[in-house]
Image: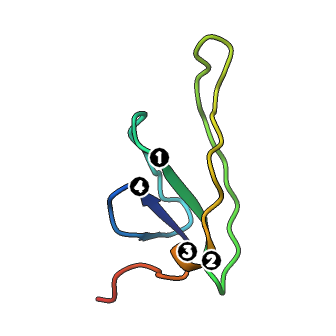
């Protein structure tokens, strides 16, 4: 189980085996929940020899908001 968030959208919980797609023009983050670990496998292309631009780390305050309660 993990959490992810696309810039400007709420945090979403995902399960093992889920496939997540993110718009190329939007920042996003993903990681484990506070109580469950997560393994990350990514498939991505390189453009002009570069395949990723790492941005700022998510703060504890941003992360611990968590997904909306149902």
Q: Are marks 4 and 1 in contact (CB under 8 Å)?
A: yes
User: Residue 68: x and y, percent?
Assistant: 34, 82
Q: Judge whether 25 appears above or below 29 on screen.
A: above
User: Residue 33: x and y, percent?
Assistant: 60, 78
Q: Are marks 2 and 3 in contact (CB under 8 Å)?
A: yes
The residues bearing labels 3 and 1 have C-alpha atoms spaced at a distance of 15 Å
| Nearer-N-terminus badge (1/2) | 1
| Nearer-N-terminus badge (4/2) | 4
| Nearer-N-terminus badge (3/1) | 1
Q: Are marks 1 and 2 in contact (CB under 8 Å)?
A: no
Q: Judge whether 23 appears above or below 48 on screen.
A: below
The residues bearing labels 4 and 2 have C-alpha atoms spaced at a distance of 17 Å
Residue wearing tag 2: 60
Residue wearing tag 1: 27
Residue wearing tag 4: 6
Q: Which mark is residue 63?
A: 3
Mark 1 falls on what kind of element?
loop
């Amino acid at each position: 189980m993990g959490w992810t968030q696309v810039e400007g959208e709420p945090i979403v919980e995902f399960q093992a085996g889920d496939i997540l797609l993110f718009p190329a023009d939007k920042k996003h983050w993903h990681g484990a929940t506070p109580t469950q670990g997560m393994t990350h496998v990514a498939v991505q292309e390189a453009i002009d020899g570069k395949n990723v631009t790492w941005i700022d780390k998510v703060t504890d305050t941003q992360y611990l908001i968590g997904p909306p309660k149902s």
